Structure formats: structure tokens, C-alpha cells
Amino acid sequence: MKKSFVALLAVLLMAGCASVEPKDETRGWTVDQIYVAAHEEMVGGNYTRAIKLYETLQARFPYGRQAQQALMEQAYTHYKDSEPELALAATSRFLRLYPTSPNADYLFYLRGLVSYNDDTSFLARATAQDTSERDPKAAREAFNSFKELITRYPDSRYAEDAADKMGKLARALGGHEMHVARYYMKRGAWLAAANRAQSVIQEYANTGHNEEALAILEQAYGKLGQKQLQEDTRRILALNFPQSVYLSTPWEPRQLPWWQFWG
């Protein structure tokens, strides 16, 4: 009798657990019903709910126009929900599954936008850190995504904004190379400084750093005992910047802090 009671109690407990399982309100919904609901949640800013619905749609209806649209909007929703890694994963998945989609240009643009905006960390905002001094990984990824967009889809409606952002990123990347070159000069790492200065001149020639880069290069060559290269660099500096202060005053490191909490 006691064993029967225990068995009955176990059955009742299992039934009770089953009864509290969350009900799937989308059971029986059509693909269009799920998509419309997900889109409305996204527009309303209910990103967590929207993503769940997009995932449900793709799981139940993995083929067709709605699944493609759902994945694209899922990537955007992750971006809006400040989930850059998930957004990038979704864009990569879309481009892998639908490489010939008419929306592919938008996915390249979105991928660039995710990395572009991922460069504004809390620490950088709190300390007013110069963008050129941050880790350039996100900036490089954004630049490459925008570049791929413009190369593949030069007539895309996103190409103009992508080109504008590429210009800003190039200036930041050029500034970063200069920041590193100055650091190496301060440390006495002459060859490393020369390599960074050359990178600025060759890769970021239109970012406004050529004059100082040439001055650093001249100094670095002198420290390395490369007199001929030093003289050649000085001639190039004089030819391109005849009024340069570095022609009369050798380049010296500036002792400036990279943050000021007091603004």
C-alpha cells in the first residue's frame, strides 16, 4: 500500500511539473504570422522577444523569403540590442547562406556599422580617450567591411555613407599608427618607429600625418645610422613641406597625457 502511494505521488508530481511548462503561443501559426509578430516586436523595441520569434520562424520554416528576411532583421535586432558579436555572427551567416541576395549590400553595410559603433567603449567615453589611441581591431574590421561593400556594390545606396565612414576610419587608423610611432621613438625602438612612420606614409597618405611621419622617419634613420636614407627623407620633407618646423627643429616627443578625467 505504501509503495502504491509513493508511486501515485510521483505520478502526480510529474503531472504537476508538466502542467506548468510555458505554453508556446506560436504553435500553429503560419510563417507570415510569426514574421509579422517578430517585426512588430522589433519596431517596438522589444528586441529579446523579436529575436526569439525570428529564431522560431527560421527553425520551423528554414526555406523561403521569410526565413531570409528574418535572418537579416535578426542581425539588425542584435545590433540595436547592443549585441555586436551576435550581430556579426548573424550577418556572416546571412552572407554565407544567401551570397546572391539583393540585400547582400545592406548586410556588408550593417557588418561595418556594427564594428564602427563598437569602437565607443565606456572607458573611452569616460576618459575622453583619443580614438587614435584605442585598439584599432574594430576600426580595421569596419573599414574592411565598408571597403568590400563599395568594391562589390559601387552603386549601392549605402556606398556613399560607407565611403564617408571609411574616411573617418582612415584618419583614426592613421592617427593610431602615428601614436604607436611616437611611442616607439620615446622607447628608443628606432626600427619599429621607422616601420610605423612608413606605414602612415604608404597606407594613410591622405590623413594629415605625412609631415610628422617624415620627421620621425628622418630621426629614426639617423638613430639607426642610415645616413643616406636620413638625407633622402629630409629632402622629401623639404620638397613637400618647405615651411615645416621640423626642418629647423628636429622632431621631439611631446609629453601629453592620453586622458584627462577633469576634461
Image (cartoon, grey):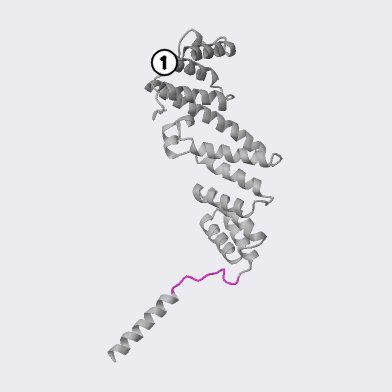
Q: Based on the picture, tell me whether residue 253 belongs to the magenta stretch.
A: no
- 33 up-or-down from 134: above or below: below
Regarding residue 185, the answer to whether it shows in the image is yes
Q: Based on the picture, tell me whether residue 26 belongs to the magenta stretch.
A: yes
Q: Is the magenta stretch mostly helix, strand or loop?
A: loop
Q: Where is residue 75 in the image (x, y as percent from the top left)?
A: 57, 51
- 29 up-or-down from 200: above or below: below
Quadrant in which the N terminus is drawn: bottom left
Crowdedness near tag 1: few (<14), some (14–19) or many (≥20) residues, C-alpha within 10 Å? some
Q: Position of residue 70 (x, y in %)?
A: 61, 57
Q: Which of 206 and 48 is in front in this view?
A: 206
- Magenta range: 20-28
Q: Nearer the viewer, residue 228 or 50?
A: 228
Residue at (60, 72) in percent of width and height: 28
The single residue placed furthest to the bottom in the displayed view is 1
- 223 up-or-down from 67: above or below: above
Residue at (60, 39) in percent of width and height: 146
The single residue placed furthest to the left in the displayed view is 2
Residue at (55, 23) in percent of width and height: 201
Dot 1 amino acid type: Lys
Q: Position of residue 133 (x, y in %)?
A: 45, 30
Q: In which quarter of the image is residue 32?
A: bottom right
Q: Which of 176 and 164 is in front in this view?
A: 176
Q: Position of residue 249 (x, y in %)?
A: 46, 9
Q: Name the residue under label 1.
A: 223
- 105 up-or-down from 60: above or below: above
Regarding residue 82, the answer to whether it shows in the image is no
